[in-house]
């Protein structure tokens, strides 16, 4: 079970000192120290820009740790990055959308040195030119590029201790010779993701409880290779390759299950004990290639960008799920039920994208572009069940999904004066999809065809009231298409009566986003945002009473489905400022979020099974506090300490009420010549544990407590070598960037 929780965070750092002596003909003035304040965090027309190239925060850190300390970004599960007011964020690297699934991307960012980063762009409301979905914001990581001929790079080793020990390493290099530029990274590591669960569900007469652990060992290896060649003074060609491989052998689920039954008078009838022991083996490979051509058409910055891309994702997974009879001492009394599954998935995507930006002398810009995506997914699922009484039952399902997306966009941007600018645009998308299932027993599952068109407007207005005050407004509309794995109609089993059912009938969800931002002196800001999601895609916990062999059981199924509408209102007030001659860089923000849920469901669309109705018409108001502090411990800028804390109180989400979360993190870092040594201690108070509770009017209740062992310590050593003169990389958008996130 993976859960994404929304909070907001911000971080700011950056300083420069210079000494100067000035001699006057009539008198001499001694100026001991002049502080140069550089806008390392600033608001541009449609984005926030965090310039980290000269910041000590980046040195010796991983990319993931740096992103956690970037203004407006946050994480609560140490895997998923979020933008304030957004349910999630899409990672772009040099303008190219990441090809990796969520787990692989988190591992990659945690093993990639932050020393390679020039700046980070945070786009809270992406424009029409971005192919993103729903309320997603964009985090664009701009890597450094060699300015002079030669070679530079960095190496990093780290060791992490949570419940289990983990290690990772990485090597990055940049090379430039005349018109040729090459950058490469190789990263790898081993870790075991540990979780503990307490699960409770039932009603007044049947109560289930499952307690135990999930351990998922992983080996990861991946990286990237970017080759950029300058054909002429006005044209460039580039080839990019991104790859990531994951292997997980003997991932285990070990739960002790207790089922207690009462009569209508609340008298105990009986208590049954069982164990769920599941093992899982999986391998996944993710490779993408992108060919880019860029032509500058005039001296004002007009240019043509053409991209062609290919994405190949392969995952092979087998699972052995066993229900074992037991007693109050949890003795193994023999297997009573077994399910064997093979759930491979292959995704092939071919895509192309063309963009042309025409700039005029009167601060007027027109951008036009289009894209095409052709995606084929192949899911050959094998399912065998054995109750050791009847013959083994086989339920194969060969599900093939084909999708074609055509998109066009037009943006017009105008700077009316030094104080006022605006950007207006729209996307038009046409989607044709076909899902077929060769072995489906239900006729409606054998062929699922959909065609829909969407007009998606965008508006951004920016007004600089004066040098210190800036006000901006943005509106966008987006479609959230289901991930490819969500459409594959397979059942993911936790226990015999607790599972997740995917759904090929899930349709795209429409999302409308608004945001008003006020900024003062690039140090204080207020962000007001609103998101409306229609036909929101989520998993819905449905329960029902079933009977097997004359015995009643309470079944809990998490159904992937569209679940009504949801609104999110949020307000965040933030400060980012340095004190005591920049020995302390402190960031503090406080925000409030109001959620309005409106959904109900009682049927599994895939199987047609009828459950007790689940309703969520609840509203909630929650607040968040977060502070990130960097303390410079010496004048030479070689010792740094960090103190970070967040707290978010309870809020209503689709699954129920999420209880309060908090985390206190400490760090210490030493920079010595080209070496950086650091130690980080996370979730010291062990308060970052997910607890969700829900109770329906009919008496059904559901309780989930999930500890992912966020408390831990990380020790790392990094070394930088070569010529460190750098400049930012040329941004390249890939043709398949709107597809990549849907492999998560």
Image (cartoon, helix red, strand yellow):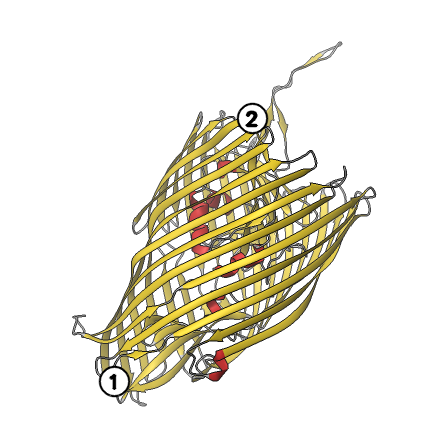
Quadrant hosting residue 403: bottom right
Element carrying mark 2: loop
Residue at disc 1, secondary structure? strand
The image shows residue 254 at horizontal and vertical percentages of 27, 65
Residue nearest the viewer, comparing 342 with 574: 342
Q: Looking at the image, do the residues carrying marks 1 and 2 touch, with CB atoms under 8 Å apart?
A: no
Residue at (67, 68) in percent of width and height: 454
Q: Is residue 156 visible?
A: yes
Could you classify mark 2 by the number of other residues whose Cα lies within 10 Å: few (under 14), some (14-19), or many (20 or more)?
some
- Residue 568, by quadrant, is bottom right
Q: Compare residues 716 and 301 and report the one nearer the observer.
A: 301
Label annotation for residue 516: none
Q: Position of residue 286 (x, y in %)?
A: 45, 53
Which of the two labelled residues, at mark 1 and mark 2, occupies the earlier sequence position? 2
Query: Mark 1 packing: few (<14 Cα in 10 Å), some, or many (20+)?
Result: few
Q: Residue at x 54, y 55 (%)?
A: 89
Left or right: residue 353 versus residue 387 is right
Distance between mark 1 and mark 2 Cα atoms: 80 Å
Residue 654 visible: no
Q: Which mark is residue 149?
A: 2
Residue 513 higher or lower than 730, as above or below: below
**Image spot of residue 449 (x, y percent):** 56, 75
Q: Is residue 255 left or right of residue 295?
A: left
Residue placed most toward the observer, 613 or 685: 613
Point out which mark residue 268 bears: 1
Left or right, residue 481 beside residue 294: left
Q: Is residue 390 left or right of residue 697?
A: left
Position of residue 33 measured from the top left corner of the image (x, y, whole percent): 61, 22
Q: Which quadrant is home to the N terminus?
A: bottom left
């Amino acid at each position: 079970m993976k859960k994404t929780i929304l909070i907001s965070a911000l971080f700011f750092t950056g300083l420069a000192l210079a000494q100067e002596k000035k001699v006057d003909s009539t008198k001499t003035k001694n100026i001991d120290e002049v502080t140069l304040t550089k806008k390392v965090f600033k608001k541009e027309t449609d984005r926030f820009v965090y310039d980290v190239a000269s910041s000590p925060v980046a040195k010796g850190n991983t990319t993931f740790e740096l992103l956690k300390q970037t203004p407006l970004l946050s994480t609560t599960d140490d895997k998923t990055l979020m933008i304030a007011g957004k349910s999630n964020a899409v990672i772009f690297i040099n303008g190219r959308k990441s090809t990796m699934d969520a787990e692989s991307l988190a591992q990659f960012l945690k093993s990639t040195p932050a020393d390679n980063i020039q700046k980070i762009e945070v786009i809270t409301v992406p424009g029409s030119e971005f192919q993103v979905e729903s309320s997603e914001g964009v985090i664009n990581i701009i890597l450094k590029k060699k300015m002079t001929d030669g070679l530079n790079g960095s190496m990093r080793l780290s060791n992490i201790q949570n419940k289990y020990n983990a290690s990772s390493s990485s090597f990055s290099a940049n090379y430039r010779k005349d018109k040729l530029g090459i950058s490469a990274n190789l990263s790898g590591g081993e870790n075991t993701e540990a979780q503990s669960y307490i699960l409770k569900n039932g009603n007044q007469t049947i109560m289930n409880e499952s307690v135990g652990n999930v351990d998922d060992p992983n080996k990861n290896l991946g990286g990237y290779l970017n080759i950029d060649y300058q054909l002429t003074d006005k044209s460039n060609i580039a080839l990019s390759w991104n790859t990531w491989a994951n292997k997980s052998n003997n991932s285990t689920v070990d739960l002790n299950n207790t089922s207690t039954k009462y009569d209508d008078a609340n008298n105990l009838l009986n208590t049954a004990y069982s164990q769920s022991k599941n093992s899982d083996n999986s391998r996944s490979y993710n490779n993408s290639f992108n060919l880019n051509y860029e032509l500058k058409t005039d001296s004002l910055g007009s240019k043509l960008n053409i991209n062609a891309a290919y994405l190949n994702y392969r995952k092979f997974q087998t699972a052995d799920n066993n229900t074992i009879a037991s007693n109050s001492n949890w003795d193994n009394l023999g297997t009573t039920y077994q399910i064997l599954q093979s759930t491979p998935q292959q995704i092939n995507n071919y895509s192309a994208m063309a963009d042309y930006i025409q700039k005029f002398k009167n601060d007027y810009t027109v951008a036009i572009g289009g894209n095409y995506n052709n995606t084929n997914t192949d899911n050959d699922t094998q399912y065998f069940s054995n109750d050791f009484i009847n013959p083994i039952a086989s339920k194969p399902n060969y599900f093939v999904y084909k999708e074609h997306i055509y998109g066009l966009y037009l943006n017009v941007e105008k700077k009316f004066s030094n104080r006022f600018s605006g950007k207006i645009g729209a996307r038009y998308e046409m989607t044709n999809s076909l899902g077929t299932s060769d072995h489906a027993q239900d006729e409606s599952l054998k062929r699922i065809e959909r065609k829909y068109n969407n007009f998606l407007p965008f508006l951004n207005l920016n007004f600089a009231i004066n040098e210190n005050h800036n006000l901006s407004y943005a509106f966008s509309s987006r479609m959230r298409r289901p991930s490819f794995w969500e459409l594959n109609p397979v059942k993911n089993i936790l226990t015999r009566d607790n599972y997740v059912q995917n759904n090929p009938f899930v349709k795209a969800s429409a999302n409308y986003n608004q945001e008003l931002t006020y900024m003062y002196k690039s140090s204080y800001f207020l962000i007001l945002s609103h998101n409306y999601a229609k036909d929101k895609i989520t998993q819905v916990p449905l329960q029902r009473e079933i009977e097997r062999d004359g015995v009643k059981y309470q079944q809990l199924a998490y159904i992937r489905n569209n679940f009504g509408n949801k609104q999110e209102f949020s307000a965040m007030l933030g400060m980012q400022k340095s004190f005591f001659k920049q020995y302390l860089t402190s960031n503090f923000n406080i925000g409030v979020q109001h959620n309005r849920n409106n959904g109900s469901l009682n049927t599994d669309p895939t199987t047609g099974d009828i459950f007790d109705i689940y309703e969520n018409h609840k509203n909630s108001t929650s607040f968040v506090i977060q502070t990130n502090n960097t303390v410079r411990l010496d004048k030479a800028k070689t010792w740094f300490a960090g103190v970070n804390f967040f707290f978010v109180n309870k809020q209503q989400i689709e699954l129920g009420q999420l209880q309060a979360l908090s985390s206190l993190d400490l760090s210490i870092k030493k920079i010595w010549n080209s070496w950086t040594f650091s130690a980080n201690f996370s979730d010291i108070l062990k308060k970052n544990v997910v607890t969700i509770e829900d109770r329906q009017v009919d008496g059904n209740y559901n309780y989930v407590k999930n500890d992912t062992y966020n408390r831990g310590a990380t020790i790392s050593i990094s070394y930088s070598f070569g010529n460190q003169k750098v400049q930012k990389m040329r941004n390249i958008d890939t043709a398949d960037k709107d597809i990549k996130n849907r492999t998560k």
